[in-house]
Image (cartoon, rainbow, N blue to C red):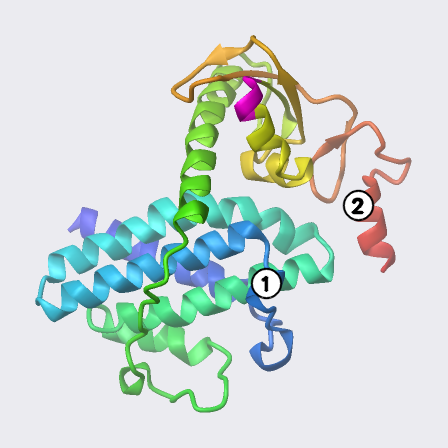
Amino acid sequence: FRQLSEAYRKMRNTARFMLGNINDFDPAKDMVADDQLFEIDRWALDACNKLTANLRDAYDHYDFSRAYHALYNFCVIDMSNFYMDVIKDRLYCADDHARRCAQSALYRILVDFTKLLAPILCFTSQEIWSYIPKLPGMKDYVVFEQMPEAKADADEAFEAKWARIMAIRDDVKKVLEQARADKTIGSALEASLTLYCSKEVYDFLNAIPMDELADLFIVSHVDLVEGEGGVKGLVEGLGVAAAHAAGNKCLRCWKYEPSVGEDGLCPRCAKVLKQ
């Protein structure tokens, strides 16, 4: 019973996080088109699409155990441990467009997630549904909605790219955990990473904007170096080193920047507040 109550709480709190962060979002006017979303937002939508395909098949075969475990793993692994953790900075601190991109993905995921949850947690799903901003044509009761349809057009290159990013992130997390244990850093945002790369890994990571790479690892700064060094992990051609980030802590986003001003704000946060 304790285990089931924890699983229920995880699903409920995942929905609660999404609801809390779309409370000022009007899907009729604030929705961002797919081609303007951040890549990580499109990754999250792709993860939800895979969940939909899995759940539709599980329900068709009355395999409720598989459906439950798929929902739970989606909440824990895809959402809480990765996507929602990474986008907190954009939701709380970034400019309006970046925030709307994350909200657009959260809204679309929450709508499909609630429909998929309804056969298992009917009362909770209706409670969630009652707070979701409605688009024209959406019913008042989630059980009167059609189940979402999974899209079949998988982008294998996109999926392979993000599988590799996740593997690199796993290596980085191990080094950050050791840096915490050694008291080099307190939280991950106190860290500055140096990634020692083979040429192929360097080219792969260098194609990602450095600020987005720092957000993916939830650190203040990332440097790429072509060559040997750092702690080796499972990703071939990669070594990772962590140190305390230079500069001062921004009072708004908590990132460390050498350019934090006398007002205690980094240039990005100062700009957003001025706007």
Picture coordinates of residue 102, whole percent (x, y):
57, 59
| Tag 2 secondary structure | helix
Picture coordinates of residue 193, whole percent (x, y):
62, 22
Between 57 and 205, the one lying in front of the other is 205
Instruction: Tell me where residue 109 sits by quadrant.
Output: bottom left
Is 271 displayed left or right of 183 in the figure? right
Q: Residues within 10 Å of mark 2 (few under 14, many from 20)?
A: some
Q: Quick check: 204 above or below 9?
A: above
Q: CA distance from mark 2 to mark 1?
A: 24 Å
Task: Give the residue at the far left of this rendering.
Answer: 62
As drawn, the label of residue 35 is 1
Q: Is residue 13 visible?
A: no
Is 229 displayed left or right of 5 in the figure? right
As drawn, the label of residue 106 is none
Residue at 30% across / 59% down in the picture? 51
Picture coordinates of residue 4, whole percent (x, y):
19, 52
Q: Is residue 180 magenta?
A: no
Magenta segment, which residues? 197-201
Q: Is residue 94 visible?
A: yes
Task: Give the residue at the far right of this rendering.
Answer: 262
Picture coordinates of residue 96, whole percent (x, y):
72, 62
Which sits earlier in the primary sequence, circle 2 or circle 1? 1
Q: Quick check: 146 above or below 85?
A: below
Dominant secondary structure of the residues highlighted in magenta in the image: helix
Q: Marks 2 and 1: which is nearer the front?
A: 1
Quarter of the image that includes the C terminus: bottom right
| Tag 1 secondary structure | helix
As drawn, the label of residue 268 is 2
Between 206 and 11, the one lying in front of the other is 206
Amino acid at the residue labelled 2:
Arg
Q: How many marks?
A: 2
